[in-house]
Amino acid sequence: MGHTDKEFDIILKKCFVVFESKLNDYGASWRILRPISITDQIFIKAQRIRSIEDKKVQKVGDDIISEYIGIINYCIIALIQLELSKDISLNQENKFIIELYNKYFLEAKELMFNKNHDYDEAWRSMRVSSFTDIILMRILRIKQIEDNDGKTFVSEGIDSNYLDMINYSVFALIKLTI
């Protein structure tokens, strides 16, 4: 698993550059979004990836790689929103937002290592299109949990689904770019 650690870090750097650049351009304007709106943003990105995979043609410039990066960054934004839900201030310092970003990316990485141990890196034998489908399924799960006011009976919560979507997106980016 030594090279997975390095590959994960390469993807982290790519995602962070995009996140930090947009944070510098727009600030944390996304703090205004309700959690359901973030879920819908992730859905739009995943649905676009699936559409491009199925049609094998795209008519808008952003490629699949940038959409997976967007999914990762929106999942981290969602996790930050869940943590800061009681603080509706839109004036957090960029440094604080970046600390939270890194916290959640590292949490996803730790989860990935634990699951890789148990699943023996089965993701390496999967197709990228399967990652897209699993992400879409996770989004539907989140929507159902949101519709149930965050309550689950036996299932993992919203945050676990966001973390898994981060990791499936990282796996897709590893397969597409490394």
Image (tube, rainbow, N blue to C red):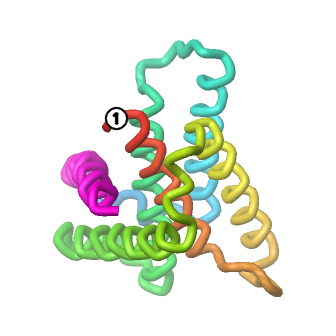
Q: How many marks?
A: 1
Residue 105 or residue 172, whichever sits in front: 172
Query: Measuring 57% from the left and 13% from the top, which residue is drawn there?
Result: 57
Would you say 19 lies left or right of 131 here?
left
| Number of other residues with Cα within 10 Å of mark 1, as a class: few under 14, some 14 to 19, many 20 or more | few
Q: Secondary structure at mark 1?
A: helix
Indicate the quadrant containing the C terminus: top left, top right, bottom left or bottom right: top left
Among the 4 quarters of the image, the one containing residue 44: top right
Among the 4 quarters of the image, the one containing residue 155: bottom right
Would you say 23 lies left or right of 46 here?
left
Indicate the quadrant containing the N terminus: top left, top right, bottom left or bottom right: bottom left
Is residue 100 something one can see in this rendering?
Answer: yes
Amino acid carrying mark 1 in the image: Thr
Residue 14 is one of the magenta-drawn residues: yes
Please tell me whether the stretch drawn in magenta is mainly helix, strand or loop. Answer: helix
Is residue 26 something one can see in this rendering?
Answer: no
Which region of the structure is painted magenta? 1-25
Query: Residue 17's spot in the image, x, y percent?
Result: 21, 48
Q: Which residue is mark 1?
A: 177
Rendered view: 90 above or below 172: below
Query: Measuring 38% from the left and 68% from the top, which residue is drawn there?
Result: 109
Would you say 163 lies left or right of 96 here?
right
